[in-house]
Image: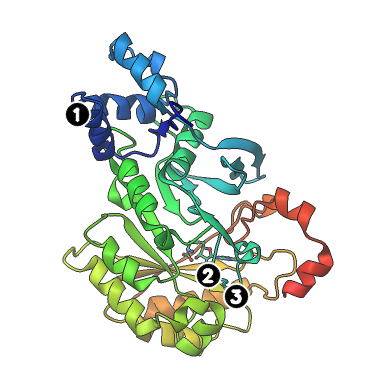
Amino acid sequence: MAGMREKVNLLGMTRQKLEEFFLSMGEKPFRASQVVKWIHQFGVSDFDSMTNISMALRARLRELAVIEAPTIVRQQRSADGTRKWLLELAGGGRVEMVLIPEKGRATLCVSSQVGCALDCSFCSTARQGFNRNLDGAEIIGQLWLANQALGRDPRGDRIISNVVLMGMGEPLLNFDPVVDAMELMMDDLAYGLSKRRVTISTAGVVPALKRLRGRSEASLAVSLHAPDDALRNRLIPLNRKYPLAMLLDACREYVAGDGKRVVTFEYVMLKGVNDSEEQAEALARLLRGVPSKVNLIPFNPFPGSRYRSSSPETIGRFSEILQERGIVTIVRRTRGGDIDAACGQLVGRVQDRTRRTSAQIREAC
Ligand code: SAH
């Protein structure tokens, strides 16, 4: 419509993009630093609170721009302290984010897509298929909202110390918005998280992983789940396109040149599927030469899931075999299971419940 330009959302803009925005308005680029601080350090969403900016410029900003995050639809809290928020996006899609408090730190698990296209057989997000990518504002908006909801600790520090892109979606299939959001997470004027505290998790989109090196310093986690291509093809269809040899090469490259960096390999423990001693040995052989750490994740069930978790004894033995072969291995404790906030359980369930009958769910298996 004539004269009714759509306003731009400043929430998802990196400092550099904000500088370009201010230059395009005929303003000095240093305004970007001021506004980044207001938005991300102080959690401000109205231009009138930006007191080091002239009234005239504030008025222009009000005309041209907004600072807008998704809306919180529901909050849940697990008996173990884990919290989950259901968020509604403009246009109607829904995603979830999860906060996992631990001793000395709190990790926010952020979503990057509504649904997911990868169709991994053990993941409930796969059931809803792919809907759309989140934009940069919707991704960083999760951290912005969570920080607001949590406030600060008694020392005045923020509660959230780590962010993992391990929620709904495949972050490397939503490259630019994810990279921008991670840049803000690590920008000293925004959240100032160190590169060790921002982790992107991928099922193995190899070309995007190669691009990521050079674009971001974020830590890398890879969902491996199988020590050989035949099994991995069944669990993660994407493996047919980018088989293990290619994936592990890209992983090696990602951490090359920095002796301290490792790739975290996630391995969900599926009873009778990928949890034998032979498979543990094969996994150790596979990871030889890749600076790595392994996270064993007990399988989290969801309605209609066809797998079961390996027993604690089997997981313990699997872990021992890896450690005997020199691989640092951690068994991840399942958190938030009582509110469906654990790995692989995020679905935007409110929508889901109303839409799906149990017959449809059975059919999907
Ligand atoms: N698509 C990215 C980001 C999702 S991260 C990726 O695959 O890495 C979510 C993590 O939870 C992945 O490691 C995924 O494999 C794991 N996961 C999925 N479903 C699970 C389930 N039911 N139980 C335990 N872990 C699961």
User: Looking at the image, do the residues carrying marks 1 and 2 touch, with CB atoms under 8 Å apart?
Assistant: no
Mark identifier at residue 354:
none
Precedes in sequence: disc 1 or disc 3: 1
Horizontal and vertical percent for residue 145? 50, 34
Mark 3 lies on a secondary structure that is helix
Question: Which residue is at 46% across, 38% downward?
Answer: 141
User: Looking at the image, do the residues carrying marks 1 and 3 touch, with CB atoms under 8 Å apart?
Assistant: no
Q: Amino acid at mark 3?
A: Glu
The relative height of residue 155 versus residue 184 in the rendered view (above or below) is: above
The answer to whether residue 62 shows anywhere in this view is: yes
Horizontal and vertical percent for residue 48? 40, 14
Mark 1 lies on a secondary structure that is loop
Q: Which residue position holds label 2?
A: 118
Question: Which residue is at 62% across, 46% downward?
Answer: 80
Precedes in sequence: disc 3 or disc 2: 2
Residue 361 horizontal side relative to residue 278, left or right: right
Point out the frontmost of discs 1 and 3.
1
Q: Residues within 10 Å of mark 1 (few under 14, many from 20)?
A: some
Q: Is mark 2 within 8 Å of ligand 1?
A: yes
The relative height of residue 87 versus residue 200 in the rendered view (above or below) is: above
Q: Which residue position holds label 3?
A: 313
Q: CA distance from mark 1 to mark 3?
A: 59 Å
Q: Amino acid at mark 2?
A: Leu
